[in-house]
Image (tube, rainbow, N blue to C red):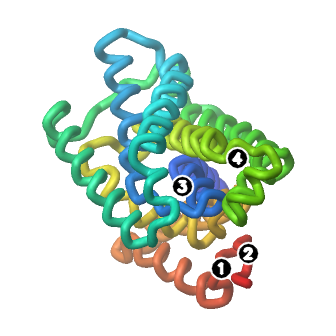
Amino acid sequence: MIASVLELIFNGVAYGIVLFLIACGLSITMGLMGFTNLAHGSIVMFGGYLVVALMKGFGWPFLATIPAAFVVCALVGAGFERLLFRRLYSAGELNQVLLTIGLVFISVAIATYLWGAGQQPLQMPAYLNARLSLGLFEVSSYRLFLLLVGGAMTGLLALVFERSNLGAQVRAAVDNRQMAMSCGINVDRLFTLVFAVGCGIAGTGGALSVNLLGLDPSFPLRYLVFILIVVTVGGSGSIWGTLIAALLLGICDVFSKYYVPEAGAFTIFALAAVILFWHPQGLFGRAAT
């Protein structure tokens, strides 16, 4: 009994880490830049398809595809920010939503045309398919790998965006663009950099989630709600809040599917509703002033 509960907790934490990786980039762009990018899931999907293409088409090892997904998705995000998104920073949220949700449907159509409508199977290397003993229970080496990568990325992101000058400059630029520019901050370049980092993280999450979440053209629509729930519950712009929300929802989802599978995703929505009832700004969100 204890072993099964511990295994469920471990699997829930691994699932939560994946949710964190695919949602963290949106939390950064929404919370620090004030831009509502519903096409974030499309970048996550692109990272997954990039891994599939590199491994199957070019024989790349899985570990080599992860930094490639970060770099390529970061460059794609920087291009979209330069060409499209920066024109809407001062526009209303409705305009931002309409543009980005349109990009989601375009990405779904492109993915369907290029890779078909079915799931993309991916063969993990042998060292990520092993079972490891942690005393009372056994775990998947792949899920343990997710925990290690997620923990390292969490610490790095928190250091960069919450404990460095970069995060302070971004918040200053969002609060008062003209004042930030008068202090010598290159706001345009700063926003491009932050958006590129957010998309790079999304691509990394997509690369790591293929074997756990599956990959098909409907991915950005299927997980858009989960991404928004994680960002909202954690508090937009908070790295630690996004992580805690993702872990809570991941563990809750795994336990509910094991004990009450007929409930489906209801428990996640119920938990999110309860949390937002008591904390409308999210667990770590800043109250409106």
Q: How many marks?
A: 4
Mark 1 or 4 closer to N-term? 4
Rendering quarter of residue 120: top left
In this figure, which residue is indicated by the disc labeled 4? 136
User: Where is residue 175 shown, x and y percent of the image?
Assistant: 71, 66
| Label pair 1/3, CB-CB below 8 angstroms | no
Give the SS element for disc 4.
loop
Percent across and percent down for residue 77 are: 47, 39
Q: Nearer the viewer, residue 132 or 37?
A: 37
- Looking at the image, tell me whether mark 4 or mark 2 is earlier in sequence order: 4
Q: Secondary structure at mark 2?
A: loop
Q: Amino acid at mark 1?
A: Gln
Q: Residue furthest top?
A: 59
Determine which residue is flagged by label 2: 286
For the N terminus, give its image quadrant.
Answer: bottom right
The kind of residue on which mark 2 rests is Arg
Gap between marks 1 and 4 measured at Cα: 39 Å
* Cα distance between the residues tagged 3 and 2: 17 Å
Image-based side of 143 in relation to 77, left or right: right
**Which is more N-terminal, label 2 or label 3?**
3
- SS at mark 3 in the image: helix
Q: Position of residue 4 (x, y in %)?
A: 59, 56
| Residue that appears at 54% across and 20% down | 63
Residue 89: horizontal and vertical position, in percent?
A: 51, 60
| Mark closest to the chain's N terminus, 3 or 4 | 3
Q: Residue placed farthest to the bottom in the image?
A: 277
Label 1: how many residues lie within 10 Å, few (<14), some (14-19) or many (20+)? some
Task: Give the residue pinned by disc 3.
Answer: 26
Do labels 2 and 1 touch, CB within 8 Å?
A: yes
Mark nearer the N terminus (2 vs 1): 1
